[in-house]
Image: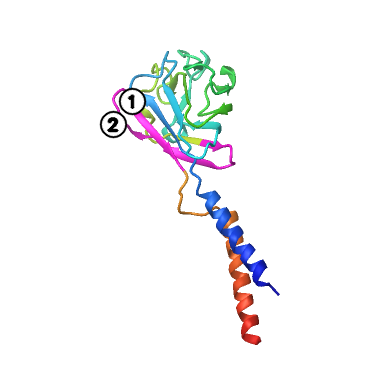
Amino acid sequence: MFKKGTLGLLMAAAVGLSTQANATPIAMGQIIDGTTFGSNDAFQFFNASDAGEKIVSLTWDLTPIAAFFDSTNSSPGVSSSPLTLGSGDAVGHHFPTNAALDGTSTLTVTFDHFDAGEMFSFGVDTDFFSNPDGFGLTGAQFIGATATAIFSNGMARTGTYVASDKSGYGSMVFIDIPTSVPEPGSLAILGLGLIGLGFARRQAKKA
């Protein structure tokens, strides 16, 4: 039988976890209006998390737009520009090798200390598979591509690039956590609390 004190603890735990789930890791990215070819700051990302969460990794996926990263002069594209750091290694970045990235549609960069309030930028050539030596996609051509952020609290969220109305940029992406939806762990404990409440009511009726 659940005692009143036990039931109270269950409900308090559910509320506490729901509150924790409402912390909001936020990140936003933008891509310059011009070509990515030869640029060291074509891709820019900002950690705007409101509870101090770090960004552990970012993954860009160009599969939805049928494009690839052209980081060496090997097929499919023979006119390339490699991964180049833009704003300096202030966030402890780890790039894949240019050889491993070349010709693929996904790029994952990991970080040691990409803290809230910090920005990261880099450049690398990108092309459509249908035009492998097009000297770099422009920012607007990334509309439909995705970016996934993994935060230090374990949350992973994906955003899709859309058109940007900011001067100098062709596309942008926003990544955030819905604050009105509890995480699965919170829902499980909340459900346990409700089961306990129903059980306690049945016991009260029997008495």
Marks 1/2 in contact by CB < 8 Å: the verdict is: no
Residue 37 spot, x, y in % from top left: 41, 16
Identify residue for label 2: 165
Q: Which of the 4 quarters of the picture holds residue 190?
A: bottom right
Image quarter where the N terminus lies is bottom right
Q: How many marks?
A: 2
Relative depth, front residue between 28 and 35: 28
Residue at the spot 57% in from the left edge and 55% down from the top edge: 16
In the image, farthest residue toward the front:
5
Q: Which of the 4 quarters of the picture holds residue 133?
A: top left
Query: What range is drawn magenta here?
Result: 149-176
Q: Is residue 32 visible?
A: yes
Q: Does the magenta stretch mainly form a helix, a strand or a loop?
A: strand
Relative depth, front residue between 191 and 33: 191
Residue at the spot 65% in from the left edge and 86% down from the top edge: 206
Identify residue for label 1: 169
Element type where label 1 sits in the image: strand
